[in-house]
Amino acid sequence: MKDIQAFAQQVFASQPFSRFIGAELTASTGDSAELSLTIQDHHLQQHGFVHGGVISYLADNAITFAGGIALGGNALTAEFKINYIRPGVGIRLIASAQARSTGKRMAICQCEIYAEDGESRKLCALAQGTVVPAA
């Protein structure tokens, strides 16, 4: 793949849900990706924390980008799991994923999701998933 960042940005720009939720693809390399999201009121649940579905979306999409890039192109999540560690509160969420093992037909990826509030950065979730090439 010639220009990983350009390819990743093109794929990300073609995702209507990512645009709707307000996410950004902030970095991508040969086996990693980072997504960020500025926290808005519509991302919150009744207790004022970022909804788990928003955190889950960031983890899933970051994992798919990291695995897809490592596999050399378009990909899909075959499965993933997430552990919520603490509530997402702050100004911004950052999901940082990396392919940990890549074969011909799948990549196993891990993702850390952080909540940032000014100078503070706290781990709020960990996720792991399997990514496969899109058919």
Image: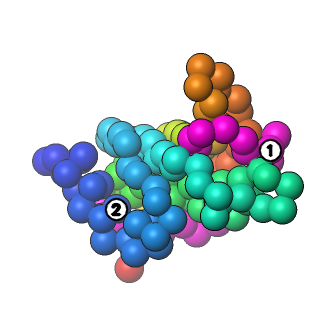
Dot in front, 1 or 2: 1
State how far apart marks 1 and 2 are (Cα): 26 Å
Q: Quadrant of residue 11?
A: bottom left
Q: What is the number of the mark on residue 12?
A: 2
Please give the range of residues in magenta: 73-93
- Residue in the picture at 59% in, 39% down: 91
Vertical placement of residue 96 versus 41, above or below: above
Badge 2 density bin: few <14, some 14–19, many ≥20, Cα 10 Å: some
Q: Amino acid at mark 2?
A: Phe
Q: Residue furthest front?
A: 41
Circle 1: element type: loop
Sequence order check: which comes first, mark 1 or mark 2?
A: 2
x, y percent for residue 127: 68, 48
Vertical placement of residue 43 versus 125, above or below: below
Label 1, on which residue?
Answer: 87
Q: What is the number of the mark on residue 117?
A: none
- Residue in the picture at 23% in, 47% down: 4
x, y percent for residue 112: 63, 39
Q: Residue furthest right?
A: 47
Reply yes or no: does residue 66 show up in magenta.
no
Give 81 or 11, whichever is nearer the viewer: 11
Reply yes or no: does residue 90 show up in magenta.
yes
- Residue in the picture at 24% in, 62% down: 10
Q: Are marks 1 and 2 in contact (CB under 8 Å)?
A: no
Badge 1 density bin: few <14, some 14–19, many ≥20, Cα 10 Å: some
Q: Amino acid at mark 1?
A: Pro
Give 12 or 2, whichever is nearer the viewer: 12
- The answer to whether residue 56 of the structure is visible from this angle is no
